[in-house]
């Protein structure tokens, strides 16, 4: 599949780097899209303590920088990561409200085990797909089977080094946002003249 085909997919899933690197890249892409005048919604992961990333995981809203804690404190002796389903649900609902208000591009931190099971940010993915919004996310190789079942032909995986290349995000978003706006205008015109 060529680069032009990838840039035409509604959903781009980044791969090929550590999670923290991908989350930093998602934040950079969000900033570049916003600078270009696009409305960007969604959430990216951040950690208050990089040495212990499981202990204080958060999702940061790209709309207003609000923070949703997605980890539960299991006490000082715990070595386990424990996601907080309530925090994930709150973040998901916030993204869904943002999509309903209107956005150009949705960035969601990742498609992982929670989303594969139908929870986590799964409903935010569904809302963005239903609204026809372009999505940028991340998927680990371990989740590829579930991802393919979930996203199907709407998605393509893109290596991090491709997504970092000069002009890539601008080319992809230009195709996606223009095509979305064009379809909306064509649909409105068809309704106006009684063809819709």
Image: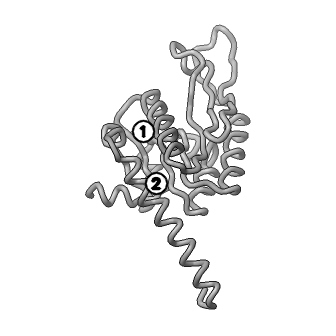
Q: Residue at x 51, y 65 (%)?
A: 180
**Looking at the figure, which quarter contains the N terminus?**
bottom left
Q: Nearer the viewer, residue 62 or 55?
A: 62
> In x, y percent, where is residue 118?
61, 49
Q: Which of the 4 image quadrants contains residue 4? A: bottom left
In the image, 101 versus 153, the foreground residue is 101
Q: CB under 8 Å between callouts 2 and 1? A: no
| Residue at x 54%, y 78% (from the top left corner) | 186
Which residue is rendered at x = 44% and y = 54% of the image? 173
In the image, farthest residue toward the top: 77
Which residue is disc 2 drawn over? 11
Q: Where residue 46 appears, x then y in whole percent?
A: 57, 27
Whole-angstrom CA distance, mark 2 to mark 1, is 15 Å
Left or right position of 90 against 127: right
The total of numbered circles placed on residues is 2
Q: Secondary structure at mark 2?
A: strand
Question: Between 162 and 53, which is closer to the camera in this rendering?
Answer: 162
Residue designated by label 1 = 140
**Marks 2, 1: nearer the viewer:** 2
Q: Secondary structure at mark 1?
A: loop
Q: Residue at x 59, y 82 (%)?
A: 189
Colouring chosen for the image of the structure = one colour
């Amino acid at each position: 599949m060529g680069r032009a085909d990838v840039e035409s997919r509604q959903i781009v899933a980044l791969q090929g780097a550590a999670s923290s690197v991908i989350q930093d890249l998602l934040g950079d892409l969000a900033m570049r899209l916003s600078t270009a005048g696009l409305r960007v919604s969604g959430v990216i992961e951040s950690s208050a303590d990089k040495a212990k990333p499981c202990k204080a995981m958060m999702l940061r809203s790209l709309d207003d920088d609000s923070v949703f804690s997605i980890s539960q404190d299991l006490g000082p002796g715990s070595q386990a990561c424990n996601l907080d389903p309530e925090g994930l649900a709150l973040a998901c609902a916030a993204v869904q409200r943002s999509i309903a208000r209107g956005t150009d591009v949705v960035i969601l931190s990742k498609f992982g085990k929670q989303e594969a099971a139908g929870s986590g940010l799964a409903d935010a993915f569904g809302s963005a797909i239903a609204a026809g919004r372009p999505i940028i996310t991340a998927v680990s190789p371990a989740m590829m089977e579930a991802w393919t079942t979930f996203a199907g032909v709407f998605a393509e995986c893109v290596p991090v080094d491709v997504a970092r290349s000069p002009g890539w995000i601008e080319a992809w978003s230009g195709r996606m946002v223009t095509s979305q706006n064009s379809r909306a205008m064509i649909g409105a015109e068809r309704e106006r003249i009684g063809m819709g």
